[in-house]
Image (cartoon, coloured by chain):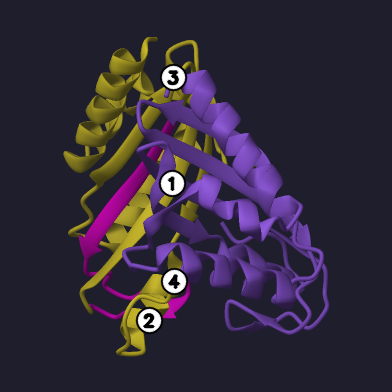
Chain colours: A yellow, B purple
Amino acid sequence: MTSPDLAGFYRDYIACLNRRDWPALGRFVAEDVRHNGRALGLAGYRAMLEQDVRDIPDLRFEVALLVCEANSIACRLWFDCTPAGSFLGLPVNGRRIQFAENVFYEIRAGKIAEVWSVIDKAAVEGQLDGGGEAG
Amino acid sequence: MTSPDLAGFYRDYIACLNRRDWPALGRFVAEDVRHNGRALGLAGYRAMLEQDVRDIPDLRFEVALLVCEANSIACRLWFDCTPAGSFLGLPVNGRRIQFAENVFYEIRAGKIAEVWSVIDKAAVEGQLDGGGEAG
């Protein structure tokens, strides 16, 4: 895909997540997808997202930065949400938090095949401590 | 810069960091650079890097993934190092750890003007707990 095609593909993927359209996930995510080195597969990837939404009912993915080249997508996602219980092992318990996820995707045969994600845990910790962003 | 130019520029920047060539930093980093929303400026940016190297004497930046488009660079950096004391507020104390930093750069007038970085703190915590990567 060209860079504009990749960007359009990715924004469609994010829209799919935001409308919780799990049956459509396979249009974007490969059957043998890997996430941070783990062979989740499409079913495991869907289960991870469904669990995320159970943990964070108001979860919404917002594209803050998007960089596309060849078969690679890099995105800085922004979240403004209220996890019901613990999140990343932290006792959020219904507090509203804001944090980024910087994530890379490798596209193969038109679908997301590899994901390398880092979530800004330090920023969440800083908000629970009552401080600002740690970073 | 074109995408190959950006990639070359970025690899030269990383080489500059790895040889601790702080006087050359201004060839790559803008005078008014911002890091995670903080107006560090070149002097503050250099001070941050010098502190990183004091804290982690064997610090070496390794490019794992690189995505360039227009005025944006996205990189997944990989670190395999031994922080002498605490790192990200964690008691690493000379243990060897491995972790990623997923980071975005905005280039203006041929230099890094804005940096949005997330370091995988959960992965470091997982290694200190004696477990695997958390995530």
Count neighbours of disc 2 (C-alpha within 10 A) and say few if under 14, some if 14 to 19, many if 20 or more. some
Badge 4 element: loop
**First along the sequence among labels 1 and 3:** 3
The number of callouts visible is 4
Q: Chain of mark 2?
A: A
Q: Are marks 4 and 2 in contact (CB under 8 Å)?
A: yes
Badge 3 element: loop
Q: Residue at x 64, y 38 (%)?
A: B12
User: Is disc 1 on the same chain as disc 4?
Assistant: no
Q: Distance from label 3 to label 2 (Cα)?
A: 38 Å
Residue A123 visible in the shown view: yes
The kind of residue on which mark 4 rests is Gly
Camera-side residue of B56 and B78:
B56
Bounds of the magenta segment = A73-94
Q: Residue at x 49, y 54 (%)?
A: A118
Q: Residue furthest bottom?
A: A130
Q: Please tell me in which quadrant of the rendered image residue A65 appears.
A: top left
Residue A36 visible in the shown view: no
Q: Distance from label 4 to label 2 (Cα)?
A: 9 Å
Can you identify the residue that label 4 sits on?
A135
Camera-side residue of B79 and A21:
B79
Can you identify the residue that label 3 sits on?
B2
Q: Chain of mark 1?
A: B
Say the numbered circle drawn on residue B112: 1
